[in-house]
Image (tube, grey):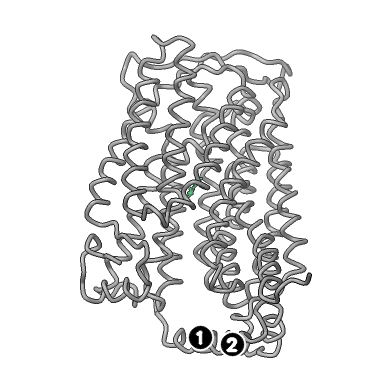
Amino acid sequence: MSLAKGEYNKTIVIVIASVAAIGGLLFGFDTGIISGAIPFLQMNFNLSNSMVENITTAALVGAVVGALFTGWITDALGRKKIILFTAVIFVAGALWSGAAATPKELIYARFLVGIAIGISSFAVPVYISEISPASIRGRLVSLFQLLITVGILAAYLTDVSFAKNDVVTSWRPMLYSGVVPGLLLLVGILFLPETPRWLIKKGKKSQALQILSRLEPPDNVERAVAEIEQELARDKEKAQLSEIFKPWLRMPLFIAIAIMFFQQFVGINTVIYYSPKIFMIAGFDSAKAAIWGSVSVGVINVLFTIVAIYLIDKWGRRKLYFVGLAGIVIALVSLGLSFFFNQHLGHTGKWLTIVFTLVYISFFAVSLGPLGWVIISEIFPLKVRGLGTSIGSLSNWFFNGLVTFTFFKIVKLLTIPGTEIITRERVYNTVTHAFVYQTINNGNPAGAFWLYAMIGILGLIWGYFYLPETKGVTLEKIEEHWRKGGKPRDLKP
Ligand code: BGC
């Protein structure tokens, strides 16, 4: 039995999108990989926590820079070329990071990787949404979000497989391993077409027709071209940067920035990047054991993202937000308590830390994780959607960088005297080539987690007034609502 034509085309599209979504995987992989490398970097170079913050934040600063320029470059060069270019940077960045001779050099190398992350976090979803037929577009775009979490998990598993407690340079193979998904993307994208939308925009209609005839059922090709042309014509009168600051668009802009603020300031990436370190402070004394703890974080993150994709159109955005964020706040308070009483709890303390971290990540993955991205893709009118979404993702990277850069500083600042957790850590002495033990005062992370919990409570209040329920509401209706000056809370299907 031969496949129906439409079905056949869908298969091609899914294959195309899956390859492009390796971009999403790389985004997760290259941000997550640093977590398991950190304990070894500290052992190898005897790094202070603030140097760890600098190395981790370097990639995020790179991502902000990448995201700032992507809109412009993807338009000028085309989606395919830019993804190809990103793949090359991913590979080069991974090689350079793994080979870095000094922590300072590692900062530069991670900054380079960050540029690729920033570009791909924007260009890949654009590629996917432009190349897929409307009927499966939403699902394919959420595939990207899921792949970020799969990428983080793959990074943790890679970390754990290279982590050898006695080999201080274990961080090198971890960072080198980014070459593999980079090469996959490089080879994959070579076989993929440019998007018809970009080709038509650049006056290459016959090429666009050729590609569309492989993507769409035959009777749909002409209509698809007409639709793209219409959209492009509308785009022409599009949006200068100033457009988005018009009074009626201030509300969606505020919502996009605020939801990313709360997504990041509940401290998600202190867990994603620093969890092995956090688990070591809690009492796990080998880097490898601590990285295993992170693997469990990675697994739960993937599983609950799948739950979210299922629930997001059933429960709606608001319910998911309140349930998720309330859970996050409770988990953060508990996590703080497990650290506050760390010295009294003995061995139980470190296990409680893992349990509360897992509760925390499951509530995040089911709510704020995907919601941030879904909301920013829904609340802007077509005319400013591209611009609005990129301001949203830029805010995401910026707030991420801020939280990551300040975590250990905040831990130190908010440590209640008398609760400091003192650990004995092994560091490598490069002169004697032997391990020596150092006593380290880690402060106590309880205060930092309680601070994030308070921000979470503010997020609940903010959400009550400002989070719109976009479930089942057409994008046109959302636009009309803003034009009329409607309150976010009053948006109804
Ligand atoms: C966030 C990232 C985070 C990831 C964790 C995403 O939604 O934007 O900052 O690392 O979720 O799964």
In the image, which is nearer the foreground, mark 2 or mark 1?
2
From the image, tell me which residue sits under label 2: 225
Which kind of residue does numbered mark 1 sit on? Leu
Residue 142, image x, y percentages: 53, 58
The kind of residue tagged 2 is Val
Estimate the x, y position of residue 453 in percent, counting from the top left: 32, 35
Question: Is 83 in front, or is 355?
Answer: 355
Residue drawn at x 43%, y 71% is: 387
Q: Is residue 396 above or below residue 358?
A: below
Displayed quadrant of residue 378:
bottom left
Residue at image location 77% in from the left, 68% down from the top: 191
Looking at the image, residue 327 lies above or below residue 178: above
Give the residue pinned by disc 1: 232
C-alpha separation, residue under disc 2 versus residue under disc 1? 10 Å
Whichever of callouts 2 and 1 sits on the residue coming sooner in the sequence is: 2
Mark 2, ligand 1, within 8 Å: the answer is: no
Could you say which disc has been placed on residue 179 in the image? Answer: none
Quadrant of image for the C terminus: bottom left
In this picture, is 228 found above or below 309? below
Picture residue at 71% right of the left edge, 41% below the top: 98
Which element carries disc 1, helix, strand or loop?
Answer: helix
Q: Is mark 1 within 8 Å of ligand 1?
A: no
**Viewer-nearest residue: 107 or 269:** 269
Q: Is residue 398 left or right of residue 71?
A: left
Question: Which of the 4 image quadrants contains residue 385?
Answer: bottom left
